[in-house]
Image (cartoon, rainbow, N blue to C red):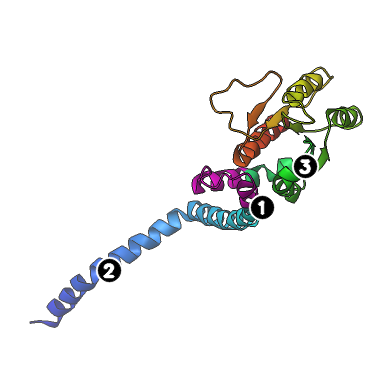
Amino acid sequence: MSSEASVLIEFVKVSPALIVSVVGSLFLMANADAIGQLLRKATKVSALGVSIEAAGDTFDDAVRAHGLEGMVSHRERMAVLRRLSACGPLLRGTRVLWVDDQPANNEAEVRLLRSLDVEVQQVTTSTEALDFLKIRNYLLVITDFDRQGSPTAGITFAGQVAAQTAAPPVIGYVGSSQAGMARPAHFFGVTNRPDHLMHLVCDVTQREGS
């Protein structure tokens, strides 16, 4: 066999790998910008994951406090934490007025909001809440229904808030499931689940910030 034929045979053996390498290099050069964007996005997702997990423990405390471990799935948990992280810049520096005659019931949820630099003012009566609404602006109001011996105190309070000028949205945070029940008048939303509560907070935040 001639030396020229041997060289040709060796080239044929190597050429598939060489061709793949050349094609790969050309692809990378042609799509450098797109690949760079993907890498930057991956970095952001990784950083986002860190912030999500930092808030996760507090959220889990809220779920356990209400005995809802079997109701909030891992997917729902991650969805609300990602949502909170995305809404973080809009939430930062806002004020929330929280009315509940047993504030200890909401300790974890309040900590979660405060970790996002939300100023949470907690009061135990409708009268106190209405006084604060006269002197300060709030992004939203969160209220329970049943307090101080009245199962509809929060519903009555929501009507009083709605009667005010530039009234903030009111969210009901209650002790039992509201599935299948009509939402009372003057409420932006009502729930007994911490994940749904945080979604409602983000809904208000994005609406008011748009």
The mark lying in front, picked from 1 and 2, is 1
Amino acid at the residue labelled 1: Thr
Q: Which residue is tagged 1?
A: 58
Q: Earlier in the sequence, mark 1 or mark 2?
A: 2
Q: Name the one closer to the observer, 158 or 78.
A: 158
Q: Secondary structure at mark 3?
A: helix
Rendering coords of residue 172 (x, y %): 69, 30
Q: Position of residue 90 (x, y in %)?
A: 72, 40
Residue 178, image x, y percentages:
59, 28
| Callout 1 touching callout 2 (CB < 8 Å) | no
> In the rendered image of this protein, does residue 48 appear above or below residue 187?
below
The label on residue 103 is 3
Label 1 and label 3: CA atoms lie apart by 16 Å
If the image is split into quadrants, where does the N terminus sit? bottom left
Q: Residue at x 69, y 18 (%)?
A: 185
Query: Where does label 2 land, which residue?
Result: 17
Q: Nearer the viewer, residue 196 or 208?
A: 196
Q: Is residue 8 magenta?
A: no
> Above or below — where is 21 with respect to 123?
below
Comes first in the chain, label 1 or label 3: 1
Distance between mark 1 and mark 2 Cα atoms: 53 Å
- For numbered disc 1, what is the local secondary structure? helix
Quarter assignment of residue 3:
bottom left
34 with respect to 57 (left or right): left
In the image, which disc is placed on residue 139?
none
User: Looking at the image, which is closer to me, 111 or 106?
Assistant: 106
Alpha carbon separation for disc pair 2 and 3: 68 Å
